[in-house]
Image: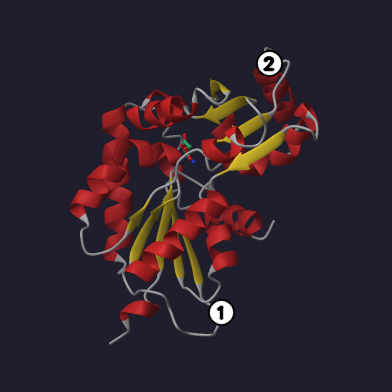
Amino acid sequence: MMKKTALPIGVFDSGVGGISVLRELVALMPNENYIFFGDSANAPYGTKTLDEVVELTCKDAAFLYEQGVKAIVVACNTATSAGVKILREHYTTIPVIGIEPALKPAVLSAKHPTVLVMATPMTLREEKFKNLMHRFEQDAKIIPLPCPGLVEFIERGELESEELEAFLRKLFAPFKEVDAVVLGCTHYPFAKKMIGKILGEEVQLFDGGAGTARETKRKLEEFALINPSLEEGKVVILNSAKDPEMIALCERLLYL
Ligand code: DGL
């Protein structure tokens, strides 16, 4: 029988965005094995109802659990805000790690900065984000910015198109003075180059990928699940869209 520590870490997202978390996990723990599941057939999640996203989140986690994973990483801010609590109640024997917008480092980046928080409408609407915002609202001017439509560009592999540039220019047009931007959806780090081009280099961009990878490592240590192998681990990528193009896109994003 395979040792428990050698079992893969399951990582899922509504689509290809979670690859931005997977690449941080692989960078931090290259000797672990991974199964990444992207639910591109049902993306985007962020504009669906809460009930729909809870149901999809539970299905995604169940699918990974059936593959025999030793931990589940919810590499999706939307799914985390909708369902991580439910998953933790259900899967009590393995760690379940979620992601949330990296608001803290953005708030601490300057003295009372203006911080734009880009995320899906659901992430910004849910209790989890409201609580996070209350914690820091004395220290910064925090502006939640729902970005419906942005996920679709990334799902199409459009990271530098003129259409993406026009979409983002329109989105940012009302905000003249911004110090920091939180990329509060795991798809958005793939638009970083374009966001930087529009807002300028002085505006710092923050995402939760690296923090989530560190938290995953801490949890694996706590559960004595760190893989002691010195060999490079395996990464398996699966996608509900059943389109080989989606797997190719995930591979491209992983090694970007
Ligand atoms: N990647 C997801 C997130 O981090 C959600 C995108 C979506 O499906 O709307 O929020």
The crowding category of the residue bearing disc 2, from other C-alpha atoms within 10 Å (few below 14, some 14 to 19, many at least 20), is few
Residue at image mark 1: 232
Task: Say which mark, if any, is on residue 22.
Answer: none
68 vs 171, left or right, is left
Residue displayed at 49% across by 23% down = 137
Label 2 secondary element: loop
Name the residue tied to disc 2: 175
Image height of 219 relative to 173, above or below: below
Query: Which of label 2 and label 1 is nearer to you?
Result: 2
Residue 107, horizontal then vertical, whole percent: 58, 33
Give SS at disc 1: loop
Q: How is the image coloured?
A: secondary structure
Relative to residue 100, is residue 222 drawn left or right?
left
Q: Name the amino acid, label 2.
A: Phe
Q: Quick one: which residue is furthest to the top in this view?
A: 174
Q: Residue flagged by tag 1: what amino acid is it?
A: Glu
Res. 188 visible in picture: yes
Q: Position of residue 134 (x, y in %)?
A: 42, 25
The residue lying at 46 percent from left, 34 percent from top is: 44
Gap in Å between the C-alphas at discs 2 and 1? 45 Å
Please state which of residues 217 and 245 is positioned toward the viewer in this rendering. 217
Residue 7, picture quadrant: bottom left
> To which quarter of the image does residue 176 belong?
top right
Q: Is mark 1 within 8 Å of ligand 1?
A: no
Q: Residue at x 41, y 75 (%)?
A: 226
Q: Nearer the viewer, residue 197 or 211?
A: 211
